[in-house]
Amino acid sequence: MARATRFIYNDMPKKKIKNIESLPFLTTGDYEADARNNPNNIYIQRQLGLHYEAVNNWESAKDIYLRQIKKHPTNPDAHFYLGSFFAMLGEYDKSRQSFEEALELNPDHKGTIDAMAMYTNTPDQKALSNQILGMSSRLVPEGPAQKITIIRQRLVEGNYTDALRLCEEGQKNFPTHNGFLQLTGETELALGNVEDAKSAFQRSIKLNAKDKNSHVSLANLYFDLGKYVYAALSFGDVIFLDPEDADSRYMQGLSYFKAQEWGRAAAAWEDLLHYRPDNEVVRVLLPQTYYILAVEYNRLGNPSMGRQSFKNALSVNQNTNQWLASSMATLGGYYREKRMYRESLAAYQEVIELDPSSAEAYLGLGLTYWNMDEKDLAKSSWQKSMTIKPDNNESQGWLILSDQES
C-alpha cells in the first residue's frame, strides 16, 4: 500500500489538468414539482411514474398511471403506460388487459405494437406479445402487428433471409413504425452484417428518437465492436430518455473506463451511485478509477488533485484489497499502450507485490517486455504466469508465438 501510494505523492510539477465534475441529476422532488406544475400533461406525469419505478416506489407509480387513465380514458397512451408498468412487475394478466384497452381505442397503436416487438426476453413476455399482436392482427388484419408476429417467427426459426424480406416490406408499408427497423437490425446482427445492423438501429432512432430499445441496441453494438467512446455516447442517449436506467449508467461508465476516459467513467459511476448506492460492482470499479485518476493527476503535475482523487477512492470503498491491485494492473496496460514502458513495468511490479499469485500481472509484465523487444524476459514472465495458472491462461498462446518466432 505504501509503495503503491508513492505514485500519488511524487510532487514533480508537469502540465496541469483540471478536475472533471459529475453531472447533476434530477431528484424525486424535481420530478414531483414538474408534475404538479403540469397536472394535465400526461407525458410529464409519465416521467414521474418512470422515476417512481426506478426508485422502487411501485404504489406511487401505479397511482400516477391510474390517475392518467381516469383523466384521459380515451388516450391509448394512458392504458399503454399502465400495461407497461404491470409487465415490468411481471403481472402479465393485468398488463394484457391494459394493452387490450389501448388497442381497442387504436388497433394500430404505435407504442403498443412497437413494444410488443421487443417483448422477447422470457416465455411470459413472448406469450403476452403473441396475444397482443394477435389481437391487433384480428382488428387490423393487414396491419403492422401481423407482420411483426411473422417476422419474429422467422427469427425463431432461423429463417433470417425471409425475416429480412418481411422487415423491408413492413418498412415500406408502415413507414412510421420504427419497430420494423429495430427488427431489421436484430436480423442483420444474426446474419453477421454488423454495419447493416448499425445502420438499421440508427435509422430507427432517426425515425423515433424516443425509442429506448434502439438506443440500447446501438450502444451494445458499439460496445461489442470495441468502439467504447461511441458506446458511452449511445448509453448517454439512453440515460437522457430514462435517467433512472441503472444498467445503462453502469455500461456508460464501463464504456468510458475501457476507453481510458477515467474522469468520465468516474462521473458516470458517481451518478449511478445516486440511484443505486448499494451497487457492489461499482463500489469496486469506481475506487479503481479514482486511483488511476490520482496517479495521472500526479504524473501530470497536479498533486493536490491526486490526493483528492485518492481520498475519493477511499470514501467509496476503504477496503483497498478489493481494488488497489486491479488499479495498478489497469495502469500497467494503459502505460504500455502509451509506450511508457518504464511506468508499465513499475505498475505490474506493484501488482505482484500486492498479489504475488496474480497470473494476470505476469501476463501483463510479459506483454510489456515483449513490446520492449525483451523476448527472454517476456517468456520468463509468461512461464511464471503459467506456473500460477496452468489452465485458461492467455500466456500459453504468447509462449507458443514466442517459440515460433525464435
Image (spheres, rainbow, N blue to C red):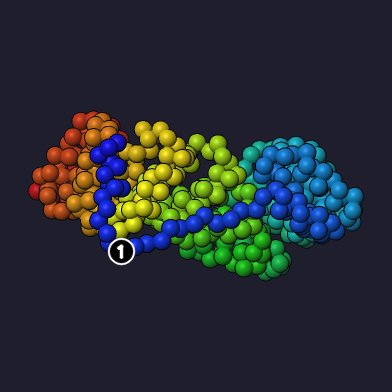
Q: Does residue 127 show up? A: no
Task: Return the x and y of residue 163 as percentages of the image width and height.
Answer: 60, 56
Compared across the picture, whether 351 is left or right of 232 comes to: left
Give the residue drawn at x 81%, y 47%: 64
Q: Relative to 100, is 222 above or below?
A: below
Q: Relative to 98, is 188 above or below?
A: below
Give the residue drawn at x 13%, y 53%: 373
Give the residue drawn at x 88%, y 55%: 72
Splitting the image into 4 quarters, where does residue 299 fall?
bottom left
Q: Secondary structure at mark 1?
A: loop
Task: Return the x and y of residue 349 as percentages of the image width and height.
Answer: 21, 41
Q: Which residue is mark 1?
A: 15
Q: Residues within 10 Å of mark 1 (few under 14, many from 20)?
A: few
Q: Relative to 306, is 349 above or below?
A: above
Instruction: State the residue in front, 142 or 227.
Output: 227
Q: Amino acid at mark 1?
A: Lys
Compared across the picture, whether 248 is left or right of 394 comes to: right
Q: Does residue 297 show up? A: yes
The N terminus, quarter of image: top left
